Image (spheres, rainbow, N blue to C red):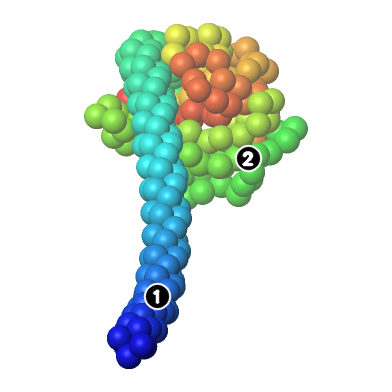
Amino acid sequence: MNEIGKQDQRIAATLRRLKLEMRAARKQTAAIKGEVEATTAVVADRTEEARDARAELIAQQQALAAARSDKRELLAGVRVERDEAEEDLDAMLAASASLAGQIQSASSSSSPSVSSSSGSSSGGDSTPSSSGFIWPVSGTLTSGFGPRWGRMHEGIDIAAPAGTPIHAAAAGRVIIAGYMGGYGNLTVIDHGGGLTTAYAHQSSIWVSGGSVAQGQSIGAVGTTGSSTGNHLHFEVRINGSPV
């Protein structure tokens, strides 16, 4: 009987030990499960962060590619505009050489017998400058006299809407009125003493010869000849040479 009792005690002790081990195993399993769940959550968060970062990187790359494409298109457009402007300027210079000869042939060294009073209408600034000229058209100065893209721009450009009246900068005699190559529709006025003014790219010419008064309307702004937009190309020449 004692032997049976001892055996029962051993079995009971083993069961208690096994129960304790099971409880410990369950706690350990629960702890491991918690760690796994926490790690899984961290991995999920980091995966989401990585996904967001990748999406942001892709968006930035696309934006950069679009910006580069826009820049290329802008540069291409600028080059085209520059090439067109250079072609226009070349055409103007070619016409300028011909114009110089025509002015010298047609102009008179005598002063014009015309009053310097304003005509039917006047331009943006009807007050004569120190040179005695008035502003020939109401508009915005967009290009001055001097070198441009390695070439000489022999006058000034004044932007204005199509049809804006152009006025004689000073009294004089019309010696050229017609179409001339890069100048398009052109009027040249002789003011005497070898001084002339030229008005190019007109949409229409309103004088054909004879005398004009300072401020008299002589034509309308346009974009004829070698021109990329409505404006007046205005030149002052002495003995045929632009100054």
* Residue beneath the point at 48% across and 33% down: 157
Give amino acid for label 2.
Answer: Ser
Q: Residues within 10 Å of mark 1 (few under 14, many from 20)?
A: few
Q: Which residue is mark 2?
A: 138
Which quarter of the picture shows residue 17?
bottom left
- Name, please, the residue furthest toward the left: 150
Choose top left, top right, bottom left or bottom right for residue 235: top left
Q: Position of residue 142 (x, y in %)?
A: 48, 39
Q: Nearer the viewer, residue 135 or 69?
A: 69
Q: Position of residue 123 (x, y in %)?
A: 65, 39
Q: Position of residue 113 (x, y in %)?
A: 58, 27
Q: Which quadrant would the N terminus be assigned to in this image?
A: bottom left
Query: To which residue does mark 1 refer?
Result: 22
Q: Is residue 44 above or below residue 71?
A: below
- Which sits in the foreground, 227 or 33? 33
Q: Residues within 10 Å of mark 2 (few under 14, many from 20)?
A: many
Kind of residue at badge 1:
Met
The part of the image, by quadrant, that contains residue 243 is: top left
Disc 1 versus disc 2: distance between alpha carbons? 101 Å
Looking at the image, which is closer to me, 56 or 199?
56
Please state the horizontal and vertical placement of residue 115, each as a whole percent of the image.
63, 34
Q: Which residue is found at the position 41% from the left and 55% from the top?
A: 47
Residue at image coords 63%, 40%: 138
Q: Residue at x 42, y 39 (%)?
A: 62
Q: Which of the two discs, 1 and 2, labels the residue nearer the N terminus? A: 1
Q: Secondary structure at mark 1?
A: helix
Report the residue that reaches farthest toward the right: 120
